[in-house]
């Protein structure tokens, strides 16, 4: 059996779901009553739940001691404290460990377990590359793209708040709907925004890239999976990173992408006064949009899922 683990946010979960869809005899181990459990059920992926509600050491070791798995060939983790007890289990049972880092910096859990792993897969190159590190891009569920899947959605600007939702980004609709056709993915804030006139609101979209195709411009947080999907299909974007993420990784992601020419970075504190200016600068300058899409194409790696599976030997 192949064990996948990592959770709490879509950036940790979605790449593993993409892997799971392409291999057999796989299970996902995560926290009970969590986003990863809900997504695994919706994608018909076997799930084993742990009683792990926080990142306290006692909770982590208790979850590890109660974990019972059949014969495991390898463990693949994307990090987050949810993966900690599973990786400890792997070390104690001499199971090969592989890690996937989705962001432009290595997270705390991945950094801790890197020394115990056989290989660390990277989405983007790091300044200091160790021998066991390999850049493979990020597996996504971006398959069967269709320009007609959301034909009925007439949209200039698509706003995406990430897997956990974003109140500040949702509030942008009040300003933008005066000048643009706006579509909002509101997440947990759906009930609050669903009845606002003259905009289209979704709580969640399972085939997000197909909806992205309809937009002239995307405004998003700077999470790993969403940004990689944006770059994979090629769409001009403004990234407004959350400033409360672990190691400030969303800001560092967005800064890295802006330096590569893939997006415009807008800090949340400047969003209200500058968002219209940023949007106009992109939509009114075709050559700027073309250069942004060229930079995105240079950054991503196609067939990431197949590359990782080959390296894992599964």
Image (cartoon, rainbow, N blue to C red):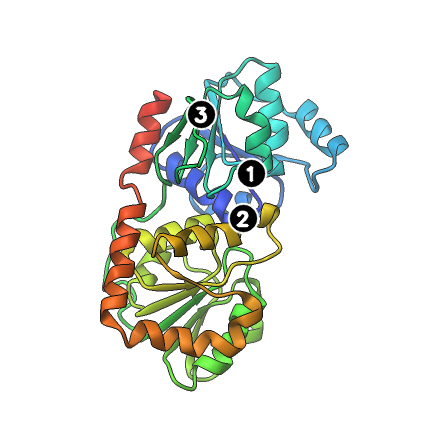
- In the image, residue 54 lies at what x, y percent? 70, 41
Establish if 150 lies above or below 69: below
Query: Which residue does the numbered mark 1 point to in the structure image?
Result: 107
Front disc: 2 or 3 = 3
* Residue farthest along the right direction in this orientation: 58
Marking on residue 249: 2
Neighbourhood count class around disc 1 (C-alpha, 10 Å): few under 14, some 14–19, many 20 upward: some
Which of the two labelled residues, at mark 2 and mark 1, occupies the earlier sequence position?
A: 1
Front disc: 3 or 1 = 3
In the rendered structure, the answer to whether residue 34 lies left or right of residue 214 reads right
User: Could you tell me which residue is drawn at 30 percent across and 61 percent down?
Assistant: 235
Q: CA distance from mark 2 to mark 3?
A: 21 Å
- In the image, residue 177 lies at what x, y percent? 43, 82
In the rendered structure, the answer to whether residue 139 lies left or right of residue 57 reads left
Which of the two labelled residues, at mark 3 and mark 1, occupies the earlier sequence position?
A: 1
Q: Are marks 2 and 3 in contact (CB under 8 Å)?
A: no
Neighbourhood count class around disc 3 (C-alpha, 10 Å): few under 14, some 14–19, many 20 upward: few
- In the image, residue 128 lies at what x, y percent? 45, 32
**SS label for mark 2:** helix
Q: Are marks 2 and 1 in contact (CB under 8 Å)?
A: yes
User: Could you tell me which residue is drawn at 37 percent across and 60 percent down?
Assistant: 263
In the rendered structure, the answer to whether residue 52 lies left or right of residue 98 reads right
Q: CA distance from mark 3 to mark 1?
A: 16 Å
Query: Which residue does the numbered mark 3 point to in the structure image?
Result: 130
**SS label for mark 3:** loop
User: Could you tell me which residue is drawn at 52 percent across and 16 percent down?
Assistant: 95
Establish if 102 lies above or below 201: above
């Amino acid at each position: 059996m192949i064990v996948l683990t990592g959770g709490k946010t879509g950036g940790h979960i979605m790449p593993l779901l993409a892997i799971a869809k392409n291999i057999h005899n796989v299970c996902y181990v995560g926290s009970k009553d969590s986003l990863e459990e809900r997504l695994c059920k919706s994608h018909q992926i076997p799930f084993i739940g742990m009683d792990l509600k926080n990142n306290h050491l006692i909770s982590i070791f208790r979850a590890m001691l109660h974990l019972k798995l059949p014969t495991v060939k390898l463990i693949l983790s994307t990090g987050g404290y949810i993966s900690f007890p599973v990786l400890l289990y792997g070390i104690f049972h001499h199971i090969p460990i592989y890690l996937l880092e989705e962001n432009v910096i290595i997270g705390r859990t991945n950094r801790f377990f890197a020394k115990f792993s056989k290989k660390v897969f990277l989405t983007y190159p790091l300044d200091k590359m160790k021998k066991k590190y390999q850049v493979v891009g990020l597996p996504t569920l971006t398959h069967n793209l269709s320009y007609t899947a959301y034909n009925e959605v007439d949209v200039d600007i698509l706003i995406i708040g990430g897997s956990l939702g974003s109140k500040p980004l949702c509030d942008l609709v009040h300003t933008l709907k005066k000048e643009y056709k706006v579509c909002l993915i509101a997440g947990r804030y759906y009930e609050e925004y669903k009845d606002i006139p003259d905009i289209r609101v979704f709580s969640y979209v399972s085939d997000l890239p197909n909806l992205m195709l309809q937009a002239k411009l995307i405004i998003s947080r700077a999470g790993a999976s969403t940004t990689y999907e944006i770059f994979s299909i090629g769409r001009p974007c403004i990234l407004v990173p959350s400033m409360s993420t672990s190691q400030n990784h969303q800001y560092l992601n967005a800064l890295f992408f802006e330096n590569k020419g893939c997006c415009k970075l807008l800090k949340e504190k400047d969003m209200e006064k500058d968002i219209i200016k940023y949007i106009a600068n992109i939509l009114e300058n075709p050559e700027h949009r073309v250069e942004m899409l060229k930079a995105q194409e240079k950054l991503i790696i196609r067939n990431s899922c197949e590359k990782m599976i080959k390296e894992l030997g599964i």
